[in-house]
């Protein structure tokens, strides 16, 4: 089933980590195999923030194979060496969990080459790369993931998130949402639905040099939009193209450094409730998610079939 | 017992055009006979007094707890119940089978007031997916917008939304009337079998797709017609009925119903299985 939620504050920052946690926790009945956050925090914009994993969470319910922790250490060392080779300087590093790391990196060259080199290390995946974006995803419900990664203090302008019920791929971090819009910095996507032309699109996109890290159909949206933008389309144009290019039922959110967008398929088969005011847009699979940040009576509505909307901060 | 056989004489409902199909074969039709009212008994119903009024705040209640509380109050004879702070909770006010004035001061989540038979409900907010699903009788009035599958499979009663609704409004509708003051999404009236839908605003693509019977009236623009949905002539009888219905529903003041588009089933899909493959293509 899955649940998605997102919000954007216009003209100000807020405690988006805590707000998104509340929204996703309200949707936990839609799935708590894994939960993911894409948070656009307040930063000085000088360095890239790279969130990456060197292994999987093998807690109960995980479909991943257990590895020795020394393997993670070896992978981290290799990543550090490759960063040095690429001319990237690590300004700050945090090892949040044995398998999950956050680096602040000074780098000013091609991101595609950067990502390909880092991800050539087996078992390593960049979850996000951006000057504002940080993707945090792990097994468990919204509160469990928030507590594990201390997200409730994150201040920023906008955020999107996903509560996942795994249906067509494994219970693991690599299949969890949000997906980073590789190789574009600060682009993330969450999706609720099923895409039925995943393999056809994947073959075409891989032939164009795009990379897939999982077999989760939702990753296709991030890659599809990234490829459109690489070809010169704006985010909104890419989203409109996706209504015809992606087959199946879907509602998805996409966020960039300064915007948040939503798209709904032409069958309108997946739910979305939207609240829009001058200073805040909040949306989720169910109204109950919005109520966690706006308990008072508000005007909400369901976007229609084939609708695409984009808001700026 | 009521006569289960379809009589030659038309019932009042049939003569008013509320349903037009000719039932054949093993299909049976049973109409309620007021003389036999004592034979009809619903388990779990209560005798309530509309003048006995109470309020409950469900802010900190789970939906099961809130519904149990409503049932408890009805069993104590309360006929007017006000629910405060529903805050988008799912499945509130479901399965109520007796007369009741139920007022929600706020918005509901999924399946609000589903499977009910008799209550008069007013919702001073918005509703999520499948509001009023399987309603047998009664009336629900929503002051704001509604989600998708509004009035799915209703058998009777009036379901009124003063705002706009999502996709598949009246899907599988089997009776009753759905009235929308604003716009409606795609697949409105999808597979409807009986009853009427009135949309004062615009409607999305595939209107009335695969409908078996029933009637849809549209006041605004139509995205596209669905398979086997066709436009029909709006009669004086229709206009009179629409005026009365909108007046009673307190919606669409001064709306010119004579300019509405009437949509019915083309009925080419009715005997779909009996058609030869080449004929099926034509039917679709």
Image: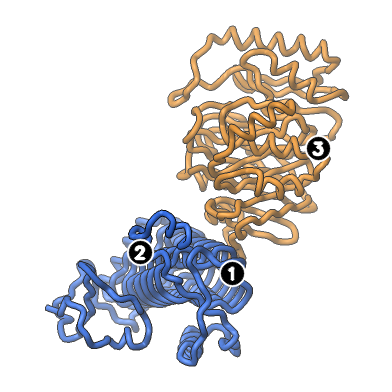
Chain colours: A orange, B blue
Q: Is residue B175 visible?
A: yes
Cα–Cα span, label 1 and label 3: 35 Å
Question: Residue B114, how many percent across, how many down?
Answer: 38, 64
Residue B34 position, x and y percent, is 20, 85
Tags 3 and 2 on a common chain: no
- Horizontal side of residue A244 vs A44, given as left or right: left
Depth check, mark 3 against mark 2: the one in front is 2
Residue at 18% across, 75% down: B40
**Residue that numbered label 1 is attached to:** B203
Check disc 2 and report its element: helix, strand or loop. loop
Of residue A296 and residue A50, the one placed in the foreground of this image is A50
Q: Chain of mark 2?
A: B
Residue occupying image coordinates x 43% and y 59%: B279
Question: Mark 1–mark 2 contact, CB under 8 Å?
Answer: no
Residue at mark 1 shares a chain with residue at mark 2: yes
Question: Which chain does tag 3 point to?
Answer: A
- Residue at image location 35% in from the left, 64% down from the top: B271
Q: Which mark is residue B271?
A: 2
Mark found first going from the N terminus, 1 or 2:
1
Where, by quadrant of the figure, is residue B27 drawn? bottom left
Question: Is disc 3 on the same chain as disc 1?
Answer: no
Label 1: few (<14), some or many (≥20) within 10 Å? Answer: many
Residue denoted by label 3: A231
Secondary structure beneath dot 3 equals loop
Q: Nearer the viewer, residue A293 or A136?
A: A136
Q: Chain of mark 1?
A: B
Q: CA distance from mark 3 to mark 2?
A: 50 Å
In which image quadrant can residue A75 be found? Answer: top right
Query: Residue B60, relative to residue A52: is it above or below?
Result: below
């Amino acid at each position: 089933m899955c649940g998605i939620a997102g919000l954007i504050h216009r003209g100000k920052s807020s405690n988006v980590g805590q707000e998104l946690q509340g929204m996703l926790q309200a949707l936990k009945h839609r799935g708590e195999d894994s939960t993911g956050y894409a948070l656009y925090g307040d930063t000085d914009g000088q360095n890239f923030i790279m969130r990456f994993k060197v292994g999987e969470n093998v807690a109960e319910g995980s479909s991943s194979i257990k590895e020795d922790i020394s393997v993670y250490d070896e992978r981290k060392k290799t990543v550090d060496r490759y960063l040095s080779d690429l001319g990237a300087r690590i300004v700050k590093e945090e090892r949040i969990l044995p398998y999950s790391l956050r680096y602040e990196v000074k780098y000013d060259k091609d991101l595609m080459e950067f990502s390909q080199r880092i991800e050539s290390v087996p078992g390593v995946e960049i979850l996000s790369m951006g000057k504002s974006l940080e993707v945090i995803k792990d097994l468990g419900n919204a509160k469990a993931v928030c507590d594990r990664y201390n997200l409730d203090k994150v201040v920023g302008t906008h955020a999107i998130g996903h509560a996942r019920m795994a249906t067509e791929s494994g219970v693991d971090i690599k299949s969890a949402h949000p997906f980073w819009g590789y190789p574009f910095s600060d682009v993330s996507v969450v999706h609720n639905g099923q895409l039925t032309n995943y393999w056809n699109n994947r073959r075409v996109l891989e032939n164009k040099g795009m990379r897939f890290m999982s077999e989760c159909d939702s990753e296709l949206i991030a890659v599809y939009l990234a490829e459109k933008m690489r070809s010169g389309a704006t985010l909104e144009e890419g989203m409109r193209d996706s209504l015809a290019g992606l087959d199946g039922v879907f509602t998805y959110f996409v966020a960039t450094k300064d915007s948040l967008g939503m798209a709904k398929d032409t069958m309108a088969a997946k739910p979305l409730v939207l609240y829009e005011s001058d200073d805040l847009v909040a949306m989720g699979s169910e109204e109950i998610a919005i109520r966690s940040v706006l308990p008072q009576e508000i005007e909400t509505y369901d976007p229609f079939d084939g609708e695409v909307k984009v808001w700026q901060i | 017992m009521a006569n289960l056989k379809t009589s030659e004489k038309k019932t009042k409902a049939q003569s008013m055009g509320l349903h037009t199909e000719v039932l054949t074969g093993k299909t049976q039709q049973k109409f309620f006979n007021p003389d036999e009212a004592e034979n009809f008994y619903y388990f779990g119903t209560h005798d309530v007094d509309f003048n006995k009024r109470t309020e409950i705040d469900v802010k900190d209640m789970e939906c099961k707890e809130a519904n149990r509380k409503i049932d408890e109050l009805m069993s104590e004879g309360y006929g007017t119940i006000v629910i405060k702070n529903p805050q988008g909770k799912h499945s509130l006010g479901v399965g109520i089978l007796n007369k009741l004035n139920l007022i929600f001061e706020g918005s509901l989540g999924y399946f609000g007031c589903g499977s009910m038979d008799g209550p008069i409900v007013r919702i001073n907010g918005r509703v999520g997916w499948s509001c009023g699903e399987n309603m047998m009788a009664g009336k629900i009035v929503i002051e704001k917008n509604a989600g998708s599958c509004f009035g799915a499979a209703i058998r009777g009663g009036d379901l009124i939304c003063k705002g706009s609704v999502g996709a598949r409004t009246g899907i599988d509708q089997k009776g009753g009337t759905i009235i929308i003051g604003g716009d409606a999404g795609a697949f409105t009236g999808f597979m409807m079998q009986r009853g009427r839908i009135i949309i004062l605003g615009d409607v999305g693509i595939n209107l009335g797709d695969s409908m078996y019977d029933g009637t849809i009236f549209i006041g605004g623009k139509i995205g596209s017609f669905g398979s086997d949905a066709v436009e029909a002539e709006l009669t004086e009888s229709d206009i009179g009925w629409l005026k009365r219905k909108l007046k009673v529903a307190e919606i669409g003041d001064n709306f010119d119903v004579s300019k509405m588009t009437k949509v019915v089933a083309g009925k080419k899909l009715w005997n779909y299985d009996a058609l030869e493959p080449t004929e099926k293509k034509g039917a679709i």
